Amino acid sequence: MKHSLRRFSVAGLLLIGVSVNAFGQAKPVNIVTTAVPFLRISPDARAGGMGDMGISTTPDINSQFYNVAKYPFTQGNAGLGVTYTPWLKDLGLNDVYLASLAGYYKLDDQQAISGSLRYFSLGNIQFTDALGYDLNSFNPREFGLDLGYSRKLSDQLSLGVALRYVYSNLAGGASTQGYSYKAGTAVAGDIGLYYTTANEDGQGWNIGAAFTNLGSKISYTSDATQRNFIPANFGVGAGHTWVSNEVHKITLSGELNKLLVPAPPAGDDVTQEEFDKYNSDGVVAGWFKSFSNNALAYSVGGEYMYNDQFALRAGYYGESANMGKRSYVTLGLGINYNIFGLNFSYLLPSGNGVNRNPLSNTIRFSLLFNFGGGIERDN
């Protein structure tokens, strides 16, 4: 089906990194953007109900997306989770979505292997030429596929690594202004650490740190000056769980994330050569240059669990101006029965324009299967 220009404009902002100057302030703010931003979307409903955080929360099936090091501390021997997230539902679009799949298997009490898939579909888009005549329609889509390995270094500390393949096809081979666009690919990796003092009931501290999406740049043309950064990130977090009468558990957590991507050139006098130089910079150099900007995001959240069967969650997410200055409140609900689990999350609408979250007024849900050991403590 044919969609309006509104969808194409939103798609461009979400899927192709651009430099945006925020006016109406004393000093323009250069927003740091990247290619394949779907890798920064929280792809499961439990994290989605707690302010989009998962680096230091208690281990669960979807730990692969946040901190692969958490898997050795899961209570089950294996698990599988599926999540569906409608995208831009607030704009009345029904065929744009993020779907994810994650799973793990513990080789023994010390180590685990894991994997996940994220698939982002933008629906069907009608392409036109410069005069507005229809050319062809195409379904832009992206996915990230990864495998991980994690191992306990001690009774309280674990280390995890993951390797990721990223595929992004936004234009389906379209050509314009002398450029022929192709699908972009990249390879990246994650490194995570997880430390816990939790006792058998689950009470104690959980601390996590993770480097994610450390890898190559991505390009949609054969032009070497048009390679784009992917969303490399460093995150840290901590949380504490209190247990009362063995059936009541309350967890409070907080996390901070730093986008390891340099800010693009900004200002009225920026030249094409400066943009070409920015796009040609190496990945490692970009990580170090990123510390000259304030591209930060933070989350705080809580979870109440009753008898390992019912969960209530809430969280708050905020960003610095260099990240877009979005902020929002999230709510979540979890239900466990036997080996099955369901998680739901809802993002309260807030902001407007570029500050409005695409998940506003959206309910997303995860279906979980826990094997070999019963229900995990905090799926």
Image (spheres, rainbow, N blue to C red):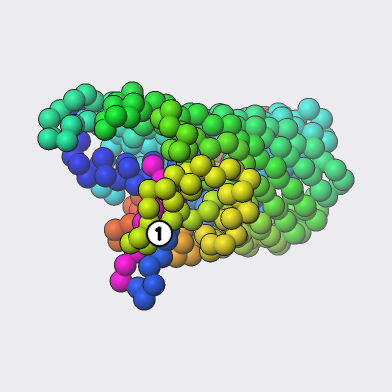
Work out whether residue 63 or residue 268 is closer to the camera in this orientation and state it.
268
Q: Residue at x 26, y 33 (%)?
A: 177
Give the main secondary structure, helix, strand or loop, of the magenta stretch: loop
Determine whether, in the image, residue 214 is placed left or right of residue 18. Answer: right
Q: Which of these two is toward me, 176 or 244?
A: 176
**Which quadrant of the structure image shows residue 102?**
top right
Residue 129: quarter of image: top left
| Residue drawn at the location 25% of the way across and 47% of the way down | 91
Categorize mark 1 by other alpha carbons within 10 Å: few (<14), some (14-19), many (20+). some
Number of numbered labels in the structure image: 1
- Quadrant where the N terminus sits is top left
The answer to whether residue 19 is above or below residue 140 is below
- Does residue 370 lie above or below 30 as drawn? above
Q: Secondary structure at mark 1?
A: loop
Residue 77, visible in the rendered structure: no
Q: Which residue is mark 1?
A: 266
Q: Residue at x 54, y 45 (%)?
A: 281
> Is 281 or 186 nearer to us in this picture?
281
Picture quadrant of residue 241: bottom right
Assess whether residue 220 is covered by the magenta stretch.
no
- x and y, in percent, of residue 130 in the image: 17, 35
Write the start and end of the magenta stretch as one range: 16-24
Q: Position of residue 346 (x, y in %)?
A: 42, 52
Q: Quadrant of the C terminus?
A: top right
Q: Amino acid at mark 1?
A: Ala
